[in-house]
Image: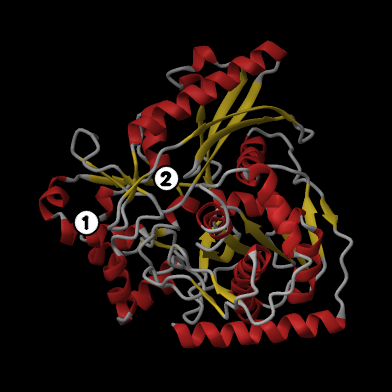
Amino acid sequence: MGTTSLKVVAYTLAGEELASRSTLMETHTDTHGQAVQDPEAIVRAATSTLTELAADLAAQGAAIAAIGISAAMHSLIALDDHNTPLTPAMTWMDARPHAQAQALWQTELGKDVYRHTGTPVHAMAPVVKLAWLHADQPELFAKARRFVSIKEYVWHSWFGTWEVDYAMASATGLLDIQTRTWYAPALAYAGIDSSALSTLVPVDFARPASTLPFADQLPLADEALCVIGGSDGVLASLAAGAIDGRVMVLTLGTSLALRTGHDEPSTDLESRSFCYILDDHRFVLGGPSNSGGVVLDWLYRNVLSESGEGFAEKFPALCAEAGTTEADDLYCVPYITGERAPIWDETTSAAFVGLKVYHRQPHLMRAAIEGILFNAYWIAQQLVKQRGKPELLLVSGKLFQQPWVLSWIANLFELPLATQAEIDGATYGAAMVAARRAGLALAAPPLQLLPTKVDAKASQQVHRRYKQWRELVRKLL
């Protein structure tokens, strides 16, 4: 269950995709930073998309051994004592609590909450959303009896129980990741107690799939399970094999994230890297950035074209042309939607600096791509300082289909690059957890090394530009 779309994918135990279905999800935004979704619409979409895929599987003569669930982190819904939503689902993009986040981080309590929970203090975090809701809508807050994520709401609609896995819970800012219990100081700041939250369960917690209200529409194998799974980021890391610190994953979609895995929790006050639970002995560390493909999409649709016309053909061609263009002294600060890592400022904005009369579309695209990847490298360097340098960088995203981008980023990160077969990491990771719980084996897709090498001279030039970019960002911010 992603923010942009809800996807259901069926995999064989050999890792082959049998069938898939998806449904676009609608997010309602406004000028005050609101970014919300309709919980009931998500339940309907989850149920209908799953049953439609089940019909595809039945037509192929396939049976479902297990269902695993992945979901986007940080959503929040307030419910009354009849479990009826009092609010829409606030998504991770909802920036209305930014003042609470900034104020909390300036206190010792904010740093204490981060150290214990591993969740960066930011408007995205449910702990901050709760404080904002308490202050902004006190009457509604007083009526609320329970606070849950979108995933919990769907799970309850299917099984009638309020349960949350440790992976999702560890992204709320309310769970102590060492003791795996709700953290009292965070609850007190949010204005709630643990009775308002769901029962904590492991990521491989399961209920019989036969008890789903629409089980008669599913071609279930004997003793098929529905496994609660985890969050999209940690499950994508599991699918990528980034679970022991040797591999760092750079994922570039609408947003961007860098992640790596470790066998013990770790936080860092300087970088505010996240640390989320994967399973009973592993954690995923990383930094999330708002500044991914959304920057390039905005640039093309609003500056470089007439209302985005010809996007499918012209956008990749422009990205390719950018590879043959030197940006010279043109730089892009890419924070068009504010920023999480590495600066953690919801109110910051984007800029092009150094524009000259001879600059054309490819120059702007080149500067924007460099700005996004410079920001990613900044995040990566913070993680390296915290936990050490990885052996390999696994890249994922359509931008990395550009050969010049791969060469350029190899020279920036000074690491071997790899990729995986075209899979949806979050659903594949959920399938891995579900298969293991059902006593079956679904291996992570193998990594494929990319034919890139670090060019010493080019690397020096890229790092020189990176230092200039960092200095520019420092001055602007």
For image coordinates 48% across by 74% down, the residue present is 272
356 or 160, which lies in front?
356
Locate residue 343, reporting x and y percent. 47, 76
* Residue depicted at 29% across the width and 56% down the height: 31
Residue 7, compared with residue 457, is above or below; it is: above
What is the three-letter code of the residue carrying label 2?
Answer: Val
Q: Which residue is mark 1?
A: 133
Q: Is residue 135 above or below residue 198?
A: below
Mark toward the viewer: 1 or 2 = 1
Toward which corner of the image does residue 97 lie, by quadrant? bottom left
Which corner quadrant holds the C terminus? Answer: bottom left
Looking at the picture, which amino acid does disc 1 mark? Leu
Where does residue 172 sit, x and y in percent of width and height?
39, 57
Placement of 375 over or under 435, stated as above or below: below
Picture quadrant of residue 422: top right
390 vs 166: above or below: below
Q: Is residue 437 left or right of residue 440?
A: left
Nearest the viewer among 372 and 3 is 372
Residue 268, can we see it?
Answer: yes
* C-alpha span from label 1 to label 2: 21 Å
